[in-house]
Image (cartoon, rainbow, N blue to C red):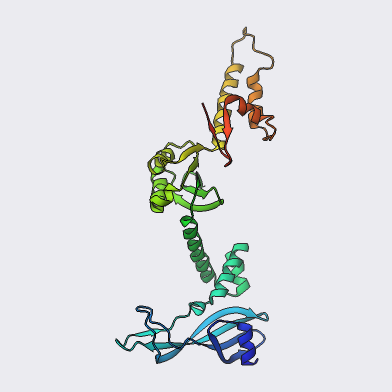
Amino acid sequence: MARDVVSVRLWLPQVRVLGVLVDLAERLAVRVVSTVLRPKCPRCATPSGRVHGRRDNKVRDLEVSGRPVTLVWQRRRLVWGPCGRRFCEDRPALGGRLTARLARRVVQDARAMTVNAAARRRRLGWDLVNALVVAYAGLVADRRRRRRCRLLLVEGTSIRRRHRYVTVLVNGDTGEVLAMVPHRNAQALSGFLASQGHRWCKGVKVVVSDGSKPYKAAIERRLGHARHVLDRFHVIRWFAAGLTAVRRDVQRRPEGSKPASDPEVFRARFLLMRRPDPNLTGWGACWAGVGFVTCGFGCGEVVP
């Protein structure tokens, strides 16, 4: 394969193809070099053109015509004149064992399939693919946490019941998971809010959580300015438990009393637990009668 043809197919900015080393049906190896004349020192950002030596770095790249490509980068080692300090040139597109575009493609594959499947598809090791996914997840988490959050959803759940519990925090505006903090106590939630900073906490206007007292204490301490709303699931469960207790008390009345043949308490739980109806028939009418309102965030609160 001609050198110019390989340059067009690779299409790497500021990279020049010196020659084709291996051109077989199962793989392709190409020697490349950076076209930056005076790379900058990573410590002082001073450009230098004095070459001390060269070394070959093998970097995997995207496939060309179905063949895996290996770039043999002739990396220069330079000397900065005033102090004589030596450094290697750095190219973000060729850094590490994979090119930046191949690393992005591997992460995209891992989002659509398992890490094992992505590693087999790109003919890479599982450890390398998993390290890329973990690094990308950290970048995504940092980016999500820096965004403004107006509605914060807090929920405690178990990864392994009676052994491992976590607190899940979700941005209600976007539906993105912000963090999974170990434990489900006040220290877990308060520690996350403290790490976010005062400015981020001031942007939170509504907090939705269950009836946990530790969560309530942490919210009052860190987000006292925000409106605290109880999520609808737990409120409905509490009302259902109360109605069940009343129904059992009615059924246990002594003989001789004359219970109603069709009391409302027997139908109230059924109306409460049935499928929601936008026309306020069923549980919607039941909640409207007891003073329950729902906000626009899919949660609710009991109002006096």
Instruction: Tell me, yes or no, if residue 113 can be seen here.
Output: no
Position of residue 64 relative to residue 232, above or below, is: below
Position of residue 59 relative to residue 158, above or below, is: below
Q: Is residue 186 left or right of residue 103?
A: left
Identify the image quadrant of residue 40: bottom left
- The mark total stands at 0
Residue 300 drawn at (x, y percent): 55, 35
Identified at 40% across, 90% down, the residue is 49
Identify the image quadrant of residue 21: bottom right
Figure quadrant of the N terminus? bottom right
Residue 88 drawn at (x, y percent): 41, 84
Position of residue 224 relative to residue 283, above or below, is: below
Identified at 66% across, 13% down, the residue is 260
Instruction: Tell me, yes or no, if residue 217 can be seen here.
Output: yes
Residue 194 drawn at (x, y percent): 38, 50
Position of residue 17 relative to residue 100, above or below, is: below
Q: Is residue 169 left or right of residue 284?
A: left
Q: Is residue 233 left or right of residue 148?
A: right
- Furthest toward the top, the residue is 256
Identified at 50% across, 37% down, the residue is 229
Residue 189 drawn at (x, y percent): 42, 46
Identify the image quadrant of residue 10: bottom right
The foreground one among 97 and 84 is: 84
- Furthest toward the left, the residue is 83
